[in-house]
Image: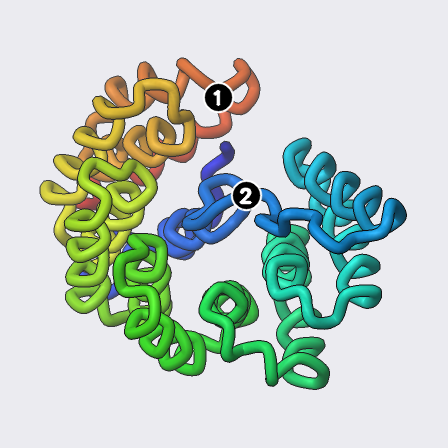
Amino acid sequence: MKVVNFLRFKRTALSVSFACAVLLSLSACQTTSGGSSSSSGQNMTSAHKTLLSAGREAENEHKYDMAANAYGRLYEKRPSDVAVLAAFIRTMRYAGQAREIVAYIEANTLHLLKNASVKFEYGKALIAAGQKNKALSVLQEVSTEIGDNWGVFSAMGIAYDALGDFSKAVQMYTQALRLSPGNVVVLNNMAMSQAMSGQLAAAISTLEKAANIDRNNTHVRQNLALLYAVRGDVNKAKALASMDLSTGDLETNLTFYQRFGGMGR
């Protein structure tokens, strides 16, 4: 993970990099809901099952363009299969084609948004497509249908972060943590939200908790290294970053840390 385009620490907005870090929880790196399609394969022809298997395999291998292609072809053959549609939306978003899939849904499949899982994936795609207010409205509707799903509240938190309403975002992450205590994805998002609102000490504390829960999570570690650098602990940031980065990347980040270290004081 390289850290780039970091802006000066402010109470209103920490940086573009932190905004991206928050949204990573909607990406392939840290998804807020399940991975592969939940379609059971019932009533499928052998050709359909082959496409489903191809989509699942590609998604598991993080080959999201291939996965989206397989799910999309399968959905054309099974236009009422909401599980396949949800998988198609998800992998299109992972593949960086959120705007395209949002346009497709709105032109072709609005009638299937009655299904909560499809609507949830649509809401996350809207965030990734930059339609923040619309995404929040959709996700609020989803929360009334599947209010026991921590991922819905985490996604709402990301939408509020994108709108700059960090206090509301933290409320959503807190609700997500009530449903899924110690969830590292949610803790990471909450920490980034706290950082963007200028609460650096709280952000570091939250992210340290996440790092202690999952000591193998490189994304959390690198975000924590970034926060240490903002606080001015450049040596601590370097030591943490060195656990995951190559020598070249570490030197790139170290230059960044030395330039911006201490701006959060």
Can you say which quadrant of the picture contains the C terminus? Answer: top left
Comparing labels 2 and 1, the label whose residue is closer to the camera: 2
Which image quadrant for residue 237?
A: top left
Residue 246, image x, y percentages: 54, 16
Locate residue 201 relative to residue 127 in the image: left or right: left
In the rendered structure, find residue 35 and report the number of the disc placed on it.
Answer: 2
* Residue 49 x %, y %: 80, 45
Residue nearer the viewer, 7 or 35: 35
In the figure, 165 relative to 200: above or below?
below
Q: Can residue 258 be seen?
A: no
The residue located at (68%, 32%) in the rendering is 61
Q: Find residue 95 and report its horizontal and vertical position in percent.
A: 67, 52
* Side of 96 relative to 172 (left or right): right
Q: Residue at x 29, y 42 (%)?
A: 188
Q: Calculate the distance from the C-alpha at mark 2 to the C-alpha at mark 1.
A: 34 Å
The disc at residue 109 is none
- Badge count: 2
Disc 1 target residue: 251
Give the secondary structure at mark 1. Answer: helix
Q: How crowded is mark 1: few (under 14 residues within 10 Å), some or many (20 or more)?
A: some
Query: Of the residues shown, which amino acid type is indicated by label 1?
Result: Glu
